[in-house]
């Protein structure tokens, strides 16, 4: 059988159509943060976690390039997944995570 006959059929890209987010069925078990750190450490830690959750949700919804992830897009995704609206700094961090994940 020729190799051309074994090629899989091309599938539709998710770029042209939105993908519904698969929301988590149960929340992740939260653990207490380590005590004794400066307040800025906790703020940065929580901001990184939020940015990571948003970057994953954006990738799941079909936003693969940081240029597509404007602040409005990130904030609407935050509302969809039930997270408080992110600040401009967190939105910038989301785009940075998307940029360096390649």
Image (tube, rainbow, N blue to C red):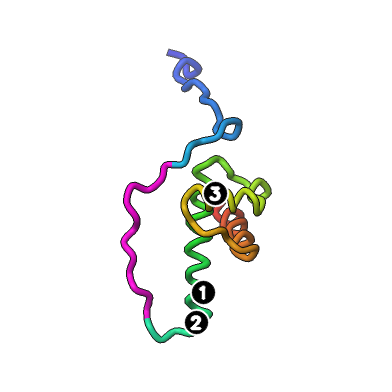
| Residue, far top | 1
Front-most of residues 11 and 36:
36
Residue at the location (48% across, 69% down)?
46
Instruction: Classify residue 100 as left or right of residue 27.
Output: right
Residue at the location (48% across, 85% down)?
38
Across and down, in percent, residue 54 comes to: 52, 54
> Which mark sits nearer the N-terminus, 3 or 2?
2
> In the picture shown, does residue 12 fall above or below 84?
above
- Residue 26 inside the magenta-drawn segment: yes
Residue at the location (56% across, 51% down)?
102
Q: Secondary structure at mark 2?
A: helix
Q: What whole-number distance in Å separates the C-alpha atoms at marks 3 and 2?
A: 27 Å
Residue at the location (34% across, 58% down)?
28
- The residue segment tinted magenta is 22-34
- Residue 46 inside the magenta-drawn segment: no
Front-most of residues 86 and 8:
86
Q: Which mark is residue 39?
A: 2
Across and down, in percent, residue 64 comes to: 58, 45
Crowdedness of circle 3 by 10 Å Cα count: few (<14), some, many (20+)? many
Residues tagged 2 and 1 counted as in contact (Cβ below 8 A): yes
Instruction: Classify residue 91 as left or right of residue 50.
Output: right
Q: Count how many numbered circles sit on residues in the image.
A: 3
Q: Secondary structure at mark 3?
A: helix
Q: What whole-number distance in Å separates the C-alpha atoms at marks 2 and 1?
A: 6 Å
Front-most of residues 84 and 53:
84
Q: Residue 88, located in which quarter of the rendered image?
A: bottom right
Residues tagged 3 and 2 counted as in contact (Cβ below 8 A): no
Q: Which residue is mark 1?
A: 43
Q: Which mark is residue 70?
A: none
> Which mark sits nearer the N-terminus, 1 or 3?
1
Q: What whole-number distance in Å separates the C-alpha atoms at marks 1 and 3?
A: 21 Å
Q: Which mark is residue 77?
A: 3
């Amino acid at each position: 059988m020729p190799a051309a006959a074994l090629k899989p059929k091309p599938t539709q890209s998710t770029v042209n159509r939105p993908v519904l987010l698969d929301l988590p069925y149960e929340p992740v078990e939260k653990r207490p943060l380590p005590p004794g750190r400066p307040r800025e450490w906790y703020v940065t830690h929580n901001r990184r976690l939020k940015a990571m959750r948003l970057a994953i949700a954006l990738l799941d919804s079909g936003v693969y390039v940081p240029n597509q992830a404007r602040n409005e897009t990130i904030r609407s995704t935050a509302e969809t997944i039930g997270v408080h609206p992110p600040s401009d700094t967190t939105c910038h961090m989301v785009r940075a995570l998307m940029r360096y994940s390649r």
